[in-house]
Image (tube, grey):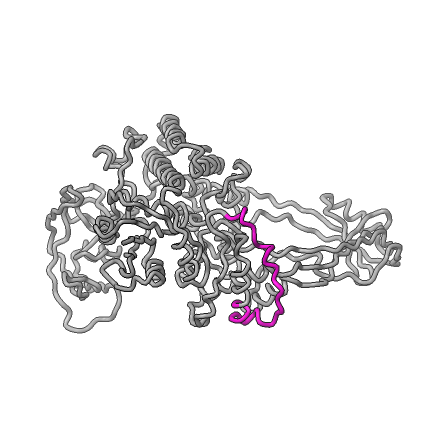
Amino acid sequence: MQLVIAEKPSVARSIAEVLGATDKKNGYLEGNGYIVSWCVGHLVELAQPDAYGEQYGKWSYDNLPILPTTWKYMVKEDTKSQYQVLYQLMKDDRVDTVICATDAGREGELIFRLTYKMAECKKATKRLWISSMEERAIKDGFDHLRPGSDYDHLYMAAIGRQQADWLVGLNGTRLFTVLYGGKMLKVGRVQTPTLAMLVDRETMILNFVKEKYYTTHLDMNGLDVATKRIDDKSQAETIMQNCQNKQACIAKVIKEEKTIAPPKLYDLTSLQRDANRLFGFTAKQTLEYTQSLYEKKLVTYPRTDSQYLTDDMEENVAAVIKAIQSELQFAKAFTLCPDIKRVMNSKKVSDHHAIIPTVEILKVELSALPTAENKILSLVANRLLCGTGAKYFYEKTSIEVDCEGNIFGASGKVVKDFGWKGLDDAFRSAFVIKEEKEPDAEAKSLPDIYEGMVFEQVTSKMLEHDTTPPKHFTEDSLLSAMERAGAEDMGEEVERKGLGTPATRADIIEKLVKDGFVKREKKQMIPTDDGMKLITILPDIIKSPKLTADWENELTLVSRGELSLTTYMNGIETMVQDLVKTYHEVCDENKKMFSVDQKPLGKCPKCGGDILKGKYGPYCSKKCGMNVGRAMGATLSDDELITLLNGKKLLMQGLRGRSGKVYAAYLIPKGIEDFTYVKDGKEITGSQFKFEMKFPKKKVAKKNSQVVGQ
């Protein structure tokens, strides 16, 4: 019997359906010679620092750097039950082969391998590598399973990425946090240079000094022509005065036939950028919506950095295009002659091809999809139609005008064939998309003119302009900058250029927001004061995109077997050691850079110390062991905690009994009590609130809590 391990339950169910494993069990499905189970993301993770020694439980400069000689792993607490299911299945005597069916990429490989190794499984492995959850793709994938060992180098690259991130992130975060005190200063291989780009842009905006410049214009019977930028106001005024009511002559007329090629298909980053610009979705939201569509079999694998299809997909793509035109209203009015070969190039496809819809869209009621998913599906479908559509063709006319020896110019265009832009306009109209764009100076058409044509008594005017500061990053432009950052330092063969990967960039942005270093203001991404200060104190080696560029170059070599993991990690460890040696003290004034004056929530009922709000919840400033963050297993809000610290009773909703039943009760504080329990072999002790509990006589409104005074 073969054990198939997918990355998510929904994917496992789709695979099981194709394989005929329809007998539902606890944590897996079985049948037809297969057992199909799943991970829940990462089941196994790197152990915490204190696993390498009790001294590392304390944040201290003297304990840095932390450089494990043998890496330790642990099963994640919140997914331990599913790990136990997989552990038992891998030990099952009926199973002779384990098939890795996690997402076909670096992280998917890591999720499977760590689970397999933690279970100390020795059974033969095979690899399923697919880009679509369609039945046809799954069957084809199982017909062409490859030995698991074919992906050993990919696994080594994944391990290298994970361990390097741990070393740099953990040591860097602890180093600068203990040096400066106060707020936790998170440092990361990708998030720090990303924050640096935001800070650099903000600095440019804050330091921007507005400058004046001028243009002189002529009105020639309604035709407006203008000089190029003039920085000297008196020069612009002189030209205006010299040309007023004078004769102007068309000195040159240049007509050019221009085309704009269809856009490339979507990889994840370009999809996230367009979804942010057109619909206002965050990068994380776009990934979630697209992942959901993938699991519903309606689009192909989303975590891709390729914008092309493989050379063997022409027949399938033709069927997809036909399905799109049948199902999506905005495409029905067009007669399509798709040039599919334009978007096919196997040499430019890495782990997965570009994101496109599947023919499964014929089998579902698209209007029943959640609105956001419908928009993403339509966006992906539109890009496939545009990408295989005809070129946008127009004629551009440029003119030069001479007036008293001064040269003026204008340009315009006439569209000859809207091509793919006609499809795009129909899509935008269907979704009422009004995108803010820079004005197109060539959008107007010019009147019939010819060289030597003369205009008498022209009127002139001078316009004053201001230079404008750089724009704040939006998530669209930030993703673009992350994708391009450090690319000039990378080799031509590097598949993943820039900061992070398409699959991780959304999480990096969310972390920066969550940690308080970046804030969203409408679509703009703006660094906070703490974000600005953090980049000020960090060394260039951490915040430069070149560091990530170098690492991605080397990880590519590791994934190809051209560089050993040991050599790669030696370089990372040396960098971390040098960092700790170089940065070892900070003057007293700078230590206060990140300090925050906090108003206490109240006094600790155990020791009388101030109760302060920390990153991970409220705590006693004297660290006496009093647990003030929870009551009866429920997390307390600030207002609820203040009520209990003041000795008042609290009506709590959502309390859960041992049977799992949810109930509400009045909690009346009656002092404190000690507690003891064992976790991971260690005894945990502390103190907590002691309560008298009373149940309300009447049914209360459904809200989290209600404070009731005595």
- Tell whether 557 sits left or right of 462: left
Residue 79 painted magenta: no
Residue 635: give x, y in percent of width and height.
Answer: 23, 56
Q: Which residues are magenta?
A: 323-349
Height in image: 624 above or below 379?
above
Q: Residue at x 41, y 39 (%)?
A: 189
- Tell whether 521 sits left or right of 382: left
- Tell whether 368 sits left or right of 76: right
Circle count: 0
Is residue 547 visible in the rendered image? The answer is no
> 35 or 295: nearer the eye?
35
> 528 or 301: nearer the eye?
301
Q: Residue at x 70, y 51 (%)?
A: 464
Is residue 627 visible in the rendered image? The answer is yes
Screen quadrant of the C terminus: bottom left
> 244 or 316: nearer the eye?
316
> 18 or 157: nearer the eye?
18
Screen quadrant of the N terminus: bottom left
Q: Residue at x 34, y 50 (%)?
A: 100
Residue 695: give x, y in percent of width and height.
Answer: 13, 67
In the orientation shown, which residue stands out farthest toward the bottom? 698
- Tell whether 588 sits left or right of 498: left
Q: Residue at x 43, y 46 (%)?
A: 528
Residue 305: give x, y in percent of width and height.
Answer: 49, 49
Residue 577: give x, y in percent of width and height.
Answer: 36, 28
Q: Residue 636 appears in which quarter of the rendering?
A: bottom left
